[in-house]
Image: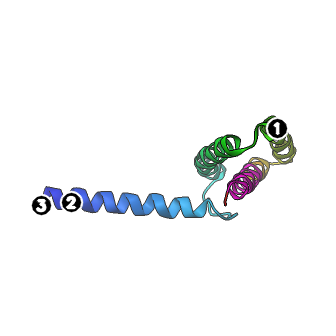
Amino acid sequence: MIRIVVIAAAALFGAAVFAFAGELDEPDRSCDGNTYQIVECQNGKLKLLEQRLAVAYQKALQMAEPKRRKQLETAQEQWLKFRDADCEYYELGGGTIARVEGGYCMLDLTRTRAHELEQAVEP
């Protein structure tokens, strides 16, 4: 009986992770609640997206021809600076909504860049 409960719990957990990961593929505004809850939700999603971005970037680096590798490193460094500066613009807006809008900016830009790098290494 305990074995069945453990298997069922593992299946439900896996399904939840899969469903949440699917949300990371498209822009959304699915974080609900007060400002604190929305920002915490965004931070959780951003952590996963940044992991996805890191994997895609490392794969792109490994697959890049040596003459293109340095340019990819430079582009990624500059892209990170752009993303952070661009989203800070939204975070500096008025009211508590500014933190939320800055968070969605980070999610949207990070998702887009991860997708871009993933597509660059697809055969």
Query: Is 85 on the left-hand or right-hand side of 99?
Result: right
Is 116 magenta? The answer is yes
Circle 3/circle 2 CB separation < 8 Å: yes
Q: Residue at x 63, y 49 (%)?
A: 49
- Cα distance between the residues tagged 2 and 1: 54 Å
The segment highlighted magenta reads 103-121
Of badges 1 and 3, nearer the viewer stands 1
| 9, 97: nearer the viewer | 9
- Cα distance between the residues tagged 1 and 3: 59 Å
| 76, 12: nearer the viewer | 76
Q: What x and y, as percent, mark residue 54?
A: 64, 42
Residue 77: which disc?
Answer: none
- Cα distance between the residues tagged 3 and 2: 6 Å
**Residue for badge 2:** 5
Question: In the image, what residue type sits under mark 3?
Answer: Met
**Residue for badge 1:** 67
Question: In the image, what residue type sits under mark 1?
Answer: Lys
**Which quadrant is the C terminus positioned in?**
bottom right
**Residue for badge 3:** 1
Specify which label sits upstream in the sequence, 1 or 3: 3
